[in-house]
Amino acid sequence: MTIMKPERWQRIEELYHAAGALPRAERVPFLAQACAEDQRLLEEVRSLLDQGVTAQGWLDAPAMTMLANAIAPRAQNAGSSQRQRDALQLIGKTVGHYQILEQIGAGGMGAVYRAHDDRLRRDVALKILTVDAGSHAEQRSRILSEARAASALNHPGITTIYEVGEDGEQVFIVMELVQGQSLREVLSAGAVETHTLVRLGAQISEALAAAHAQGVIHGDVKPENIMVLTNDRVKLLDFGLARQVVEESLTVTNISSNLPQPRLAGTIAYMSPEKLAGSLGDNRADLFSLGIVLYEMAAGSRPFLGPSAMALATQIVNDVPPRWSGGETAIGEELVRITFRLLEKKPAARYQSAHEVQVDLNSLSRSLELGIMLPAAVAGKTAVAVLPFKLLTPTPEDEYLAVALADPVINRLSANGELLVRPISAVMRYAKQTTDLMLAARELNVDVLVDGSIQRLDRRLRVHVQAWNVSNGSSRLSAKFDGTVTEAFELQDQIADALARELNPGAPKTSVSSPTGSPAAYELFLRAMERMTRNNRWDMRIAIEMLENTLVIDPQFADAWAGLAEACALMGGIFEPGSKWIARAEKAVRRALNLDRENVEAYVARARIIWTPTRKFQHRSALRSLGEALRRRPTHDQALSWRALVLMHVGLQSQAKECLMTALAVSPDNTFTLTFMGTNALYAGQYDEAWDWHARALRLDRTSLWANLLSPAAPLYAGEMEKAAKAIQSATQVLPKDPLLSSYEALLWAKRGARRKAEQLIQKATHGGKSLLHTHHMMHTVAAAYAVLGKHKPALSWLRKASTNGLPIYPVFRDDPHFEGMRSQPPFVSLMANLKREWLSYQREFGSGLASG
Amino acid sequence: MAQPSSHEVTLLLRAWDAGDKQALDQLIPLMYEELRRLAAQCLAGEQQGHVLQTTALVHEVYVRLAGVESVGWRNRAHFFALCARLMRRILIDLARSRHYQKRGSNAIHLQLDEALTVSMETAPDILAVDIALQSLATVDPRKSQMVELRFFGGLTVEETAEVMQISPETVLRDWRLAKAWLTRELAAR
């Protein structure tokens, strides 16, 4: 790095603190003014401010803790209690076919050891239960059956139980060995930062929901039983196991004693009022405990702090805990509401399912994410979802109307960018099913929900539209619209108008005239558009045919030309790659733009077409075309995602991120956007973050091809080989022969030092036919694999190929750790110099967002 | 190992401070032994439901090493600064030895358990932090020293203020920027 002048650093410092003291939305405008012409100064300060979000982290835990933690498990001279002496005696012994290696924990149930499974040759966690077999035969069998029920659970948030066994007198449970800290350890540093809290809380709820759905209740949810892995992933321990023991210990004598009883108190503190009153408690008892855990994470201490078991129990049954201090923001208040609803004394007044808690925490997490990182242009705008309308008497013939009437309404409402309207792709899953409106609203994370019903009598349609305020369930609008099928355009125009007047009264009324004079053409067009939303090859073909017929009826129908262009581009880009479809798409897009220079969809389609292998990835033209679309409709989610995708490929990571953030504000659950978010983070060197985004996309859609294909890269780069191998494996199940996966595997084995295997896989990747994704990603990975193998010549040649085939991603190649050994070699240096020149030119034109784009 | 007197440790620290490299070789095992003892205590304590605060843990190491309370005020600050630098050295040595091990060499500076080197795998790359910190020192030596005190030395805000002779508010302000800078620097690698 270059040495910075002290005055400049001082200036950066001043601006950093001044801007940091402002509300987020005001920072960029402030900096823009303060930095005036000095773009680099602005970037410098802004990039530092960007770190502020995540800076609270490992740096705040002194290096010493890391050291102590590292030494701790081995410290065997620790303590002197009888229990520990017993535990030490077990080290080196075998139970079943498990060899005990060291003790890693202890609890009311018995001790936990790290052990080696001699048969499967892996390390496991082995819990040996302290059950006196002779006198408690009944208890023993109950514990065994509980553990067996829990072992049926299969969820990433729940520790997997491999085996429940008996070895002579001993009952033992063999579990997945979880590496991480317990939430108790995390809490020892005080309250948990809100964002982390919400993410952890949502994951705990998700795991509980999965268990409850299988009829398994945890029974002892508390920080000691919640493991936090690196990446803020959560795993719950001891499902159903602790329950028995807890109940045993909860006898009247124990509770009524006024002496402090640390262990019992630790459990009682998280126990629900109904369990304390002697009832068994159902899933809602777990939810109460979750409430205490959330409270403790938010406040840094538990809500009830009675000094004895009796005092604690009395408080839990009678007292309303105080609201914790701090976080008096809208987000903080929502967290208080969720927590206190969990802490309701009566189970019926609480959340009724962990899933509902998860939904609320997830939507809070989104607001947090979006609220924090959202570009100022979209922060705070009203989010609206228009659900597909319901047909009161559904017939296959009319089915298309549900989407066909709602989709144009969505487009009209989002036209000026003042409302964040969820695109049709986000609401499609609510078509053809009865929906709990409020649940849908929360899942979609919107402020206003619109739904409608269609009644058909012969050629006449009656559409009843309602808009709801999600926060209080009140009605914003309820209106009926009548027309014939041939008046479909006027009908949706009236609906959109009425909604726009209600939701966005300030906006000037845009008069829209019918895009075609022919009702028949319009009906056919609507049917085609509905087909396209189904997003598969066959419906796409049918849509193309319908659009061609539409255009026979009215060749001047620009929207239909644009639709045809998009459909053909999708066919040629995804479903049947090849130049045939691309050529047809090109023709259609020209017609559309000749008829209507303002046609947003045509600009998007145009970008899709020219940014393909057959058209040699014209990054610059594609970005310009998407710029045209976004200037006309700033919240077009597809245009935003595509723009991000292209920016990402030319190495403009922070610009891509901004587009993706806006796209997420419009459509938070779009798996494409989430996947790109991950890959963009990967390219920015943030491997953990990349993994998180990919995992999030996969949680929403297990079968998402893109997320599956791209997710192995992050652990591969982070050096987490096991995780990478697993990700490759599960992607292979979805896409068995993709060359990109072979190239990942090649890199994996190259890094593990298996040269021959790596080289074979490189051959497989480079001769493996067509990848779902563009081949340049495979080329880049092959280059990395060669570089790791020390074969610098082919590495360079593949890297060059990647860059001339659509991936001239200079900063990523420059910093890719796999090329470490070649960095100083002249051919590499010269390739980088060329790529840098190209990159700088992209940066000049597209580096400062849309304004100059 | 016989427990060294705190006087002895103080002398070694002074000698190291004055440039005596051999003093460091004697200090590192002492410090390491102390850390080990504390970690063991920490483990035992946790099983009874107590968790030691990190700063308390750090202090105990320092106090046991050299009896901080007996050292005068001015010396105390200086002592803290030295301990922090010592901690940095130890952690970096640990990280390096892990590196060597990966490459199959036996050149390990310290006698360490395998367990220690294995479980360090998950921690952030200390070597990267060290390098980033060196480049921060070229831009802003004060903040670089502060990170050494806070992150490597485990000092509280107040102690850091005391050592650096600035106000705690300034420490907090600088700390924020230093963290942002380092996080960004590490992310860019």
Image (cartoon, coloured by chain):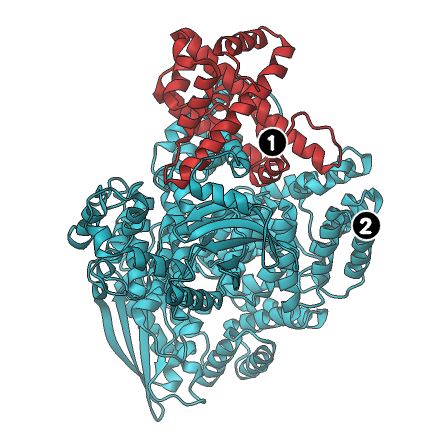
Same-subunit check for callouts 2 and 1 = no
* Letter of the chain in red: B
Figure quadrant of the N terminus of chain A: top right
Q: Secondary structure at mark 2?
A: helix
Q: Nearer the viewer, residue A696 or A587?
A: A696
Q: Residue A706, how many percent across, how many down? A: 60, 62
The residue located at (38%, 81%) in the rendering is A488
**Three-letter amino acid code of the residue under disc 2:** Arg
Q: Nearer the viewer, residue A281 or A439?
A: A281
Q: Residue A65, how many percent across, how many down? A: 48, 32
Q: Residue B8, how many percent across, how many down? A: 53, 9
Residue A217: which numbered mark, if any? none
* In the rendered image, the vertical position of residue A802 relative to residue B4, given as above or below: below
Residue B128: which numbered mark, if any? 1
The residue located at (81%, 34%) in the rendering is A826
* In the rendered image, the vertical position of residue A135 relative to residue A528, given as above or below: above
Q: Residue A54, how many percent across, how many down? A: 45, 39
Q: Nearer the viewer, residue A456 or A663?
A: A663
Residue A755: which numbered mark, if any? 2
Chain letter belonging to callout 2 = A
Q: Secondary structure at mark 1?
A: helix
